[in-house]
Amino acid sequence: MIAFWIILTGFLVASACGLLGCFLVLRKMSMVGDAISHAILPGIVIAFLWSGSREPVSMFIGASTTGLVATLLIEFFHHKARLQSDAAIGVVFTFMFAIGIILISIFAGQVDVDQDCVLYGEIAYTPIDLWILDSGIIMGPRPVYIVGTVLILIILFILLGYKQLKLTSFDPAFASAVGISTAVWHYLLMAAVSITTVSSFESVGAILVIAFLIGPPATAYLLTDDLKQMLKITVILGLFVSLTGYGLAYWLNASIAGCMATMTGVCFAVAFARHRWASSRYRARLV
Amino acid sequence: MQNLIDFFSFSDPNVRYVVLGTILLSSSAAMVGAFILLQKKALVGDAVAHSVLPGICAAFLFSGSKNIVLMLAGAFVSGWLSLVAIDYITAKSKIKKDAAIGLVLAVFFGVGMVMMTFIQQTGNAAQSGLDHFIFGKAAALVGDDLLIFSILAAVILITVGLFFKAFTLVAFDKNYAQALGYPVRRLDLLLTSLTVLAVVTGITAVGVVLMAAMLITPAAAARYWTNRIRHMVGIAVAFGAFAGLAGAYISYVAPSMPTGPWMVVVSTAIAFFSFFFAPKKGIFPRMYTQYKNQWIIAEENTLKIFYHLGERNSHFNGMRGLNELTSTREMERATLKATLRRLATKELLVTRNNQWGLTDKGYQQAARVVRLHRMWELYLTKYMDIPADHVHDDAETIEHILTPELERELEHQLDYPDKDPHNTKIPK
């Protein structure tokens, strides 16, 4: 049963991250996900100080706010100060992470948060964190519900905004010409990434969030040119990675998040080898 | 105050080590960072920083102890492999650089995490302190370790110094460097190796996540103060060294404060200040220049209105009310009023009960703008073969920009004309 909950959480996070990640990868904005997943640290610490516990609602608000602040700062420095975008990302997220660590050291006695948990997460503890109703009925692990809700929201977001997201990703000029605001959809996507990162960081950690945001979409991108196919393959890969990652972790008795990240790498390597092989055969046929 | 004196007298050998160490680390990182920033590879440092973890763990597993040389060697190898992987993925598939960086970063770190948990299970007592490599601990820089870090930092500084010209050329114009016969690929490889070296050296002080900041934040700040690469590298190194010093000082005064994050916060503060206030390139100075230019344009346009009105009855000194002024040229009333007031203080206009008129000085200015406008129109029709009804908009812009030298050149080229293409008089 423990295995089931862990794999389910992994799969839900992988799907939510992967679906959004497809658009990030296509927009060449993958590193924004990396930035947000690190930049939420101060928000989490402040929320912890505010509420005095790991109470999810205030954590959620704190982390989403800082995630959004990070995106706005990146955009601001990129556009207003004409800082090159990769430098803007690098400067902003490291700054916010540093502030987070400093806050932790100042309130060392009061905050039960450290940078380990932001980086690594604690997916192994997911099944322990149960949601128990007042009447005493055990509903199952809380993170599953949180991540599940977010996944449903993400799916709704993509279903409703599919055309707009697709157009603004592939042809921003045409999108603006037909009256779709690229800025609005950019920020909506960023908000969605923030929420997903925040809701999943506690269970899987920043590193696995990045792995799920970029790994499966990049792998799927190598296998297909069709956006709908890419989204489907991403979800299937998410399931595969959670299953095999957990298996690997069980076999090696090692970090589950680490093993899942490793498996995304393995999937990518296989797809990459296939891609190379196919293109070399294609070239051979041309000659 | 006593703290400050104690700190800067360096009487405590521990302080000496930590300060020297952090300054060396941060300045060598900033130096390499300047080049990777210019090559638009700012986030590569982040990837390398995360990717050294498996190397460190492998070295530990291999030796069974925290042999610093071996661990740095391991870190170097896996950091280097990660960069090769990023380059290979971007070169051989349609995956873009950002995705390749993120993917390599997460996967390498994931592998490192697996190895780390594996080490924890072995129960080897020497493993404690291994996580200094991940989260950094500048205060742990003591004695022998410092010697190794100093050697590495010196290697970085000297190598960059030797290849300065070549790196500059490659950073700005790869094709040109290639055409001149520079071994561009090998230089890229060298810069890659230096980046990895800088990360490996710095990571013990600030940890994986903040290493990217040590590389690029001082360089990004320095970019705002100069356009010359020599100055930029120098400024970046100075900012980096200052941040290192400040970080060391803060954690000396308040021992519970971590050095690395404070170094990052200080250098980010410098960077934010630069983004906003650096002369010419900062946000505020640029806004100021923009406003000033808009003012000048508004002033010159207003003077032109007076000239055009005067031209109708050859009475240039007449007094005009607001309505008369707005009837010739669309202008917002608030802007117009503010501009009129500015012109009056500059003594280009005289004002009497809500009416304005040109002074002699004002007339000359107005005539000059109109003259530039009309000469440019003539120039466009004569030399560019643009029809007379298409030249107005262009002249409307250029009239504010032309310098006295260009004015003389135009006069000369047009042979001191007196009529523009619309057959109106060009004022002298």
Image: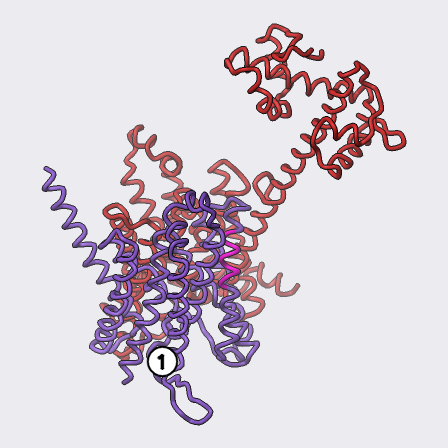
Chain colours: A purple, B red
On the question of residue A202 being in view, the answer is yes
Q: Residue at x 34, y 83 (%)?
A: A127
The C terminus of chain A lies in quadrant: top left
Q: Quadrant of residue B61?
A: bottom left
The local crowd at label 1, few if under 14, some if 14 to 19, many if 20 or more residues have their Cα within 10 Å, is: many
Q: Is residue B401 left or right of residue B64?
A: right
Asked if A98 appears above or below A131 in the picture, the reply is above
Asked if B116 appears above or below B418 in the picture, the reply is below
Asked if B236 appears above or below B350 in the picture, the reply is below
Where does residue A191 sit, x and y in percent of width and height?
Answer: 47, 62
| Magenta stretch, overall SS | helix
Q: Residue at x 71, y 11 (%)?
A: B428
Foreground of the two, B183 or A205: A205
Number of residue marks:
1
Q: Residue at x 62, y 62 (%)?
A: B4
Foreground of the two, B122 or B94: B94
- What residue would you read off at disc 1? A126
Chain letter behind tag 1: A
Residue span colored magenta:
A67-75
Where does residue B103 sit, x and y in percent of width and height?
Answer: 31, 58
The N terminus of chain A lies in quadrant: bottom left
Name which residue type carries label 1.
Thr
Which residue is farthest bottom? A135
Where does residue B35 sit, x and y in percent of width and height?
Answer: 41, 43
Which residue is farthest right? B353
Q: Secondary structure at mark 1?
A: helix
Foreground of the two, B80 or B146: B80
Foreground of the two, B70 or B299: B299
Q: Is residue A68 located in the magenta-colored stretch of the structure?
A: yes
Q: Is residue B346 left or right of residue A264?
A: right
